[in-house]
Image (cartoon, helix red, strand yellow):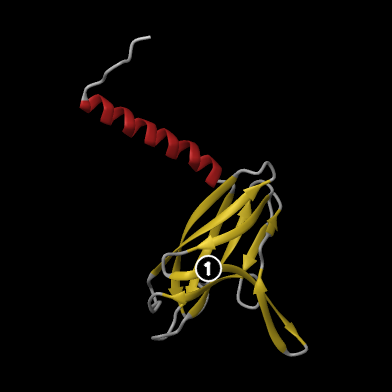
Amino acid sequence: MTAMSFSLPNRLLFRCLAALLTVGAASGVHAQVTVDGAWARTTVPNQSATGAFMRLTAQKDVVLTGASSPVADIVEVHEMWMDRGIMRMRPADRVPLKAGQTIELKSGGLHVMMMDLKKQIKAGERVPLTLSFTAADGSVSTVEVNATAAFAPPTR
């Protein structure tokens, strides 16, 4: 078998096309969950933690398995509840979403907790988040979210 040799411009074109095809294929995987109304609570200077909130709608059965953000060293999906008048909170390692189901990540319930913040989160800023999902077949996908920093949730 003889090796094919391509000129530099053709090699660059080939790599660009391969990258575009990869992105196009991946976007179908990302479409399994849509995000609506994403926002993150603003912080005061030196505040070390805040939350992000949104509605997630699954097109097929998936499990929310994690989150990350460049604005915080630690990002976890948390659940919060009241126990005899005391607020309790813990990481939620797996949040199942059924096909067609919308769940709301909101203050006082499930939410994304960002800890060890790297900077103050100011009103109007975009807070990038990456949510990780696992499907029933074991495939893993991510959804990129830009939450708007605000003092309160956006009006619908």
Q: Which residue is drawn at 49% across and 40% down?
A: 26
Considering only vertical position in the picture, is 63 above or below 93? above
Residue 1 visible to an observer of this rendering: yes
Q: Quadrant of residue 17?
A: top left
Q: Residue at x 59, y 63 (%)?
A: 55
- Give 82 or 48, whichever is nearer the viewer: 48
Q: In which quarter of the image is residue 108?
A: bottom right
Position of the C terminus, as image quadrant, is bottom right
| Residue 120 at x, y percent in the picture | 39, 79
SS under mark 1? strand
| Residue 142 at x, y percent in the picture | 53, 51
Residue 109 visible to an observer of this rendering: no
Considering only vertical position in the picture, is 107 above or below 55? below
| Residue 121 at x, y percent in the picture | 40, 77
View extreme (front): residue: 1
Q: Residue at x 46, y 64 (%)?
A: 69
Q: Is residue 9 left or right of residue 131?
A: left
| Residue 65 at x, y percent in the picture | 62, 58
View extreme (bottom): residue: 85
Q: Is residue 100 left or right of residue 76?
A: right
User: What is the three-letter code of the residue carrying label 1?
Assistant: Val
Q: In which quarter of the image is residue 7?
A: top left
Q: Which residue is drawn at 52% across and 72% down?
A: 155
> Which class describes the residues within 10 Å of circle 1: few (<14), some (14-19), or many (20+)?
many
Q: In this view, does 96 lie to the left or right of 119?
A: right
Tag 1 residue: 75
Position of the N terminus, as image quadrant, is top left
View extreme (right): residue: 84
